Amino acid sequence: MSVTAKNPILAGFYPDPSICTVGEDYYLVNSSFAYFPGLPIMHSKDLAHWEQIGNVMDRASQLPLGETGHSRGLFAPTIRYHEGTFYVICTNVSYGGNFVVTATDPAGPWSEPHYLEGADGIDPSLFFDDDGKCYYIGTHPNPEGCRYDGDYYIWIQELDLNTFKLTGEVYNVWNGALRGVHWPEGPHLYKIGDYYYIIHAEGGTGPEHAVSVARSRDVFGPYENHFCNPIFTHRHLGVRYPIKYVGHADLFRTSKGEWYMVMLAVRPAGGYTTMGRETFLARVIWENGWPVVNPGLGILSDELKIDLPEWLPEEGAVIPGCNRLYKFTQMEKLGPEFLFLRNPMEGAVMPVPGVGLVMTCQNIKMTEEKSPSFVGIRQDSHVFEASAVLDTSTLFEGAKAGIVLLQSNEFHLRLEYVGLRGYVILCRNGEEEVIASEFLPENLVSLVIQVVGTKATLLMGAGKQVKPVASGIDICALSTEVAGGFVGCTIGMYATDEEKRENPVKAVFKLFTYRRITAEELKGTEKGVK
């Protein structure tokens, strides 16, 4: 029996994937940066179908974010399993640095962070050797001094898991396969046969991204370069190739003995990446003691046949990449797929059965690098429609609520209700532009954002009677190429207030939907975007 996996296996903002195998189960984590909760954790039994079982960092005590930038916070986690315990190691680049959390159940709860004294740099990983010793591998600036931006070294040191202290000598073992390489990063250490292997990324997480490998018979080196490096990249395929930025891989073996890699890549629309870096899968074989990725093809494939029986998550599971309908009046809590910005104020966003999603209108704007009343999910398609039903009867003068397509506080598109009017607002580089407005006196209003590639149409109205307010809005600015950073767009709801009130105003959302749509469904918009 076999199953077919389709790339990307996780569509949308799921960067820096790391994976581990435990029997017939596979667990995968991704970076989350300034979003809370942090580090989504996925589960699968066939590598084709995935469910989100939780978030590793789901408590404020675990994840201080403060007023960190949108692309700061949590970088590049690694997940490993050893003798009944799961380990996730990661970097909070804004607070605390490198840390380890543990759990006996990958769905949680996970421990408080064990911060690693002396572990400088980013992108840490753990390796458990045959004798039970644990080793830390990460990256830091060239110890002889950086000659250029990205002149980093990969280093290894033993880690005592009883005390969570680094011990013994620091070994700077590798600085990349190519001469003058920029950003050797995301290293993972493995022992396969008689060799220790380092799989890492080079060239920065952009157009020059690539996967390289080195090996040694001793954990501390010296490591030899593979003459075929980089072993995987799309940087030679040109700027118009539909899948780019390939790199940051993690190697693993299935329960059937086959080898694979997960890695990140992007799928731009018209040259602009709005969904961020996604998780892809590639097959690996071994030749002459070196890994060969997608043999005979050498690039990512649209599909892979996997020698595993098909497995489907149980009904009610949180499945990435599917249409969503949230009836907040019938919900007691939000699922693990929902994201907040930084550390949300306790109780600022909560579903109340029979009422809806109640959001406190804080005196914090979406343009501020703070923790506004916002909650959303990841954009996972170039062609989609998101809609929300807002009860406007609770909004006093000055209080605002709406729906937002969010790249960051400086780059986003809002459909905002305030004072009996709906406003379309495009924010680019922190500058807000009111594109359109419409009189909207109803108590229950529908707010809709439709996206086809890099164009957006915004609609509003009463109930299902919605009409376009603005169409053909250029959202190229909500892309990595323009806005920069490491994140993809999210789509969700927010509430704010121009006034500081003793008793804050509450906004109530009754419904939120997200669905992938065909371009043919959208009249008057561009077609043909996948």
Image (cartoon, rainbow, N blue to C red):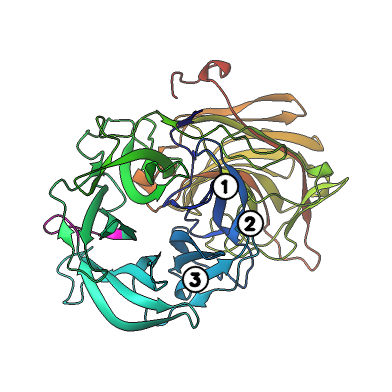
For the view shown, which residue lies furthest in the right direction?
354
Q: Is residue 354 above or below residue 181?
A: above
Label 2 – label 1 distance at C-alpha: 9 Å
Label 2 – label 3 distance at C-alpha: 16 Å
Give the magenta part as a residue range: 176-185
Query: Can the viewer see residue 448?
Result: no
Tell whether position 182 is magenta. yes
Total count of labels: 3
Residue 274 image label: none
497 left or right of 238 in image: right
Could you tell me if the residues under marks 2 and 3 are in contact, i.e. CB atoms within 8 Å?
no
Amino acid at dot 1: His
Q: Where's residue 429, x and y in %?
A: 42, 51
Q: Where's residue 385, x and y in %?
A: 60, 30
Name the residue carrying label 2. Answer: 107
157 left or right of 74 in image: left
- Nearer-the-camera pick, 417 or 44: 44
Q: Where's residue 323, x and y in %?
A: 63, 32
Name the residue carrying label 1. Answer: 43
Are there few (<14), some (14-19), or many (20+) residues within 10 Å of tag 1? many
